[in-house]
Image: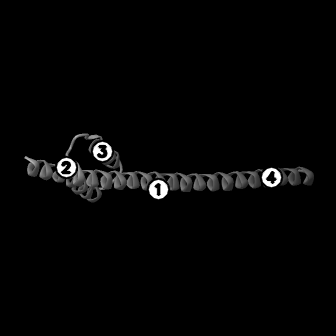
């Protein structure tokens, strides 16, 4: 075989290997960045949901302390947020959320009983 052919094949092989290495590096880097972005978005979504849950719980409890249960939309919203939390939260979080959701309901029941 002629030396020129060997040099040409070596150059083509080197270029191919270099191109594949660049492609693999770029693909792995983008895959990692996409994973980090998904994790960040998921965390932000959970923080928003938990914040909304705490806001609704505080509103429902303060409403229960002041008013009788005339409009149950606050409790419905609270239970709706708890149901959304159950899609991805652990059992310990859901048990604590149950405690939070029953407090305004018990408070409404106590005020209703006292009013009779």
Circle 4 residue? 15
Along the horizontal axis of the image, is 105 left or right of 34?
left
Q: Secondary structure at mark 1?
A: helix
Q: Check disc 1: other Cα within 10 Å, few if <14, some if 14-19, many if 20+.
A: few
Q: Is residue 104 left or right of residue 19?
A: left
Between residue 102 and residue 92, name the one nearer to us: 102
- Image coordinates of residue 70 in percent, x first then y, are 22, 40
Which residue position is annotated with label 2? 105
Among all residues in the image, which is located at the extreme left? 116
Residue denoted by label 1: 43
Give whichever of discs 3 and 1 has the lower sequence position. 1
- Horizontal side, residue 114 vs residue 90: left or right: left
Could you tell me residue 84's position as x and y percent?
34, 45
- Upstream in the sequence, badge 3 or badge 4? 4
Question: Which of the two labelled residues, at mark 3 and mark 2, occupies the earlier sequence position?
Answer: 3
Q: Nearer the viewer, mark 1 or mark 2?
A: 2
* Residue under the image location 68 percent in, 53 percent down: 26
The answer to whether the residue labelled 1 contacts the one labelled 4, judged by CB atoms less than 8 Å apart, is no
In 3D space, how far apart are the residues under numbered discs 3 and 4 (Cα atoms)?
65 Å
Label 2: how many Cα within 10 Å (few below 14, some 14–19, many 20+): some
Q: Is residue 116 left or right of residue 1?
A: left
Q: CA distance from mark 1 to mark 2?
A: 30 Å
Label 2's element? helix
**Disc sitting over residue 74 in the figure:** 3
């Amino acid at each position: 075989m002629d030396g020129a052919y060997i040099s040409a094949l070596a150059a083509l092989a080197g270029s191919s290997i270099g191109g594949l290495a660049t492609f693999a590096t770029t693909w792995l880097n983008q895959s990692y960045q996409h994973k980090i972005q998904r994790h960040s978005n998921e965390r932000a979504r959970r923080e928003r949901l938990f914040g909304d849950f705490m806001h609704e719980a505080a509103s429902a409890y303060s409403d229960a302390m002041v008013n009788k249960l005339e409009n149950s939309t606050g409790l419905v919203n609270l239970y709706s947020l708890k149901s959304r939390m159950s899609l991805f939260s652990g059992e310990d979080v859901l048990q604590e959320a149950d405690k939070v959701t029953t407090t305004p309901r018990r408070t409404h029941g106590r005020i209703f009983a006292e009013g009779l």
